[in-house]
Each structure stands twice: as C-alpha cells, then as structure tokens.
Image (cartoon, rainbow, N blue to C red):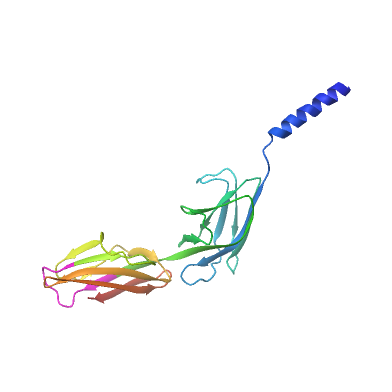
C-alpha cells in the first residue's frame, strides 16, 4: 500500500507541474467623450482573451452614469478590451496600449485607465464661389483633427461655376462629433490660386449643412 501511495503522489506532482499557471486580469477605468471630456454612460465594455471576433473567453460590463467600469477575466495571463456603443467610435487610450480598435492589458490589476470615444456626426457643406467663372477649380480636403496642417496630396476636385455640394450622399460624410471639423480649400479665381484653411464645430449626431463662401 505504501508503494501505491508513493506512485500516486508522484503522478500528482507530474500533473501539477504540467498544469497551466492561473492568472486574473482586472481593468478599472472610465470612458469619456474625446471632444467634451464628459463621461459616456451605457458603453458596453468587452474583455477577451485574444484579438478575435470570436474569442474563447470573454466577459462584459456597462459603464455607469460617470463613465466608470470595472471588469475582470479570471485565469488569463493578460486580456484585451474593446468598446461598443451605437453611434460611437473608439478613439484612444491614456495608456500606450492601443492595437487597432482594442487595448491590451497584462495580468494583475490595471487601474485609472481613461478610454476616449467620439460620437458620429455628418458633414454636408455646400461651397460657393463669390465670383464664379467656368474655368475656376476647387480642391477640397478633410484635414486632420489635431496637429500641424499637412495640406496637399489628395482631395476632391471640382470645376466650373458651382456651387459645389461636398459629399452629397445622404446623410452626408461621417465625421467626429463634438469637435471642430477642419478642412482646406485650394482654389482658383480668374487664374490665380488661393489657399484657405478653416473649420466648423459640429455637435454630436448633428448633420452639418451650410453654405460656405470662398
């Protein structure tokens, strides 16, 4: 009997050494609007064990009225988080851990995370030349939301009298709400080239429609 006990103990030690170490990944943070810096309630926070549309181990929670959330994934040495809310898009994380539309976290507890989202809005501006000529041209470009202006090298070219309906598709061109939509115009008047950089503030879920003169 003693020999059998020793054999069983040996097998248990072997199996124990082959068993995968257990971890738990905990993430605590807040989801806010990148434009207003206000909390976003009702965001679905998804934590998963891999970057996939069908991970094998997931859990979910929802942000409260202050945008706060706390979520964990047991038995995983690290995890991924992505956000879901109709009409909203993930923007950035306060940590340097963004991979595509998700953020990564190591095993243990990561606190004080700030995740930013922006609401959809739509741009449907009509650009009108104050002194139109049939040979005039207009190059319209959507500029970056922040940083230095990198103007030139792509855009939509319009020719003739106008007015020029930019992105006439209903309900327009999807942009980021609660932010300034920045654009550049490179146009000719009577053979002379002009450059103009401007912006319009577009509220969340607003369809900005206006006539802009140049």
Q: Is residue 121 left or right of residue 115?
A: left
Residue 29, image quadrant:
bottom right
- Location of residue 95 by image quarter: bottom right
Q: Which secondary structure is most common in the magenta stretch?
A: loop
Range of residues picked out in magenta: 125-137
- State the residue in front, 85 or 212: 212
Residue 62, position as x, y percentages in the image: 59, 60
- Above or below residue 81? Residue 183 is below
Q: Residue at x 67, y 38 (%)?
A: 20
Residue 16 on image: x %, y %: 73, 34
User: From this viewpoint, which residue is outermost toward the front?
Assistant: 148
Relative image position of residue 71 (x, y in whole percent): 63, 56
Looking at the rendering, which quadrant does residue 64 occupy? bottom right
At x 52%, y 71%, the residue is 38
Image quadrant for the C terminus?
A: bottom left
> Which residue appears farthest toward the right when viewing the image?
1
Q: Residue at x 38, y 74 (%)?
A: 201
Queried whether the magenta region covers residue 135, the answer comes back as: yes
Q: Position of residue 121 (x, y in %)?
A: 39, 67
- Residue at 72% x, 31% y is 15
> In the image, 42: left or right of 136?
right
Q: Nearer the viewer, residue 15 or 33?
A: 15
Residue 58 belongs to the span the image colors magenta: no
């Amino acid at each position: 009997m003693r020999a059998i006990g020793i054999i069983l103990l040996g097998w248990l030690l072997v199996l124990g050494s082959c068993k995968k170490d257990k971890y738990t990944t905990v993430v605590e943070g807040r989801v806010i609007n990148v434009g207003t810096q206000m909390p976003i309630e009702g965001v679905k926070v998804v934590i998963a064990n891999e970057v996939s549309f069908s991970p094998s181990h997931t859990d979910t929670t929802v942000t409260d009225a202050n945008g706060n959330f706390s979520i964990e994934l047991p038995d995983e040495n690290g995890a991924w988080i992505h956000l879901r809310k109709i009409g909203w898009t993930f923007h950035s994380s306060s940590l340097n851990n963004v991979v595509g539309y998700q953020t990564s976290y190591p095993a243990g507890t990561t606190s004080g995370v700030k995740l930013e989202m922006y609401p959809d809005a739509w741009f449907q501006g009509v650009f009108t030349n104050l002194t139109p000529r049939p040979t005039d041209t207009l190059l319209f470009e959507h500029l970056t939301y922040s940083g230095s202006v990198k103007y030139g090298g792509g855009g939509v070219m319009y020719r003739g009298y106008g007015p020029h309906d930019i992105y006439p598709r209903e309900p327009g061109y999807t942009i980021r709400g609660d932010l300034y939509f920045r654009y550049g115009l490179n146009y000719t008047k009577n053979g002379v080239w002009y450059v103009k950089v401007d912006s319009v503030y577009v509220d969340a879920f607003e369809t900005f429609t206006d006539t802009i003169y140049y």
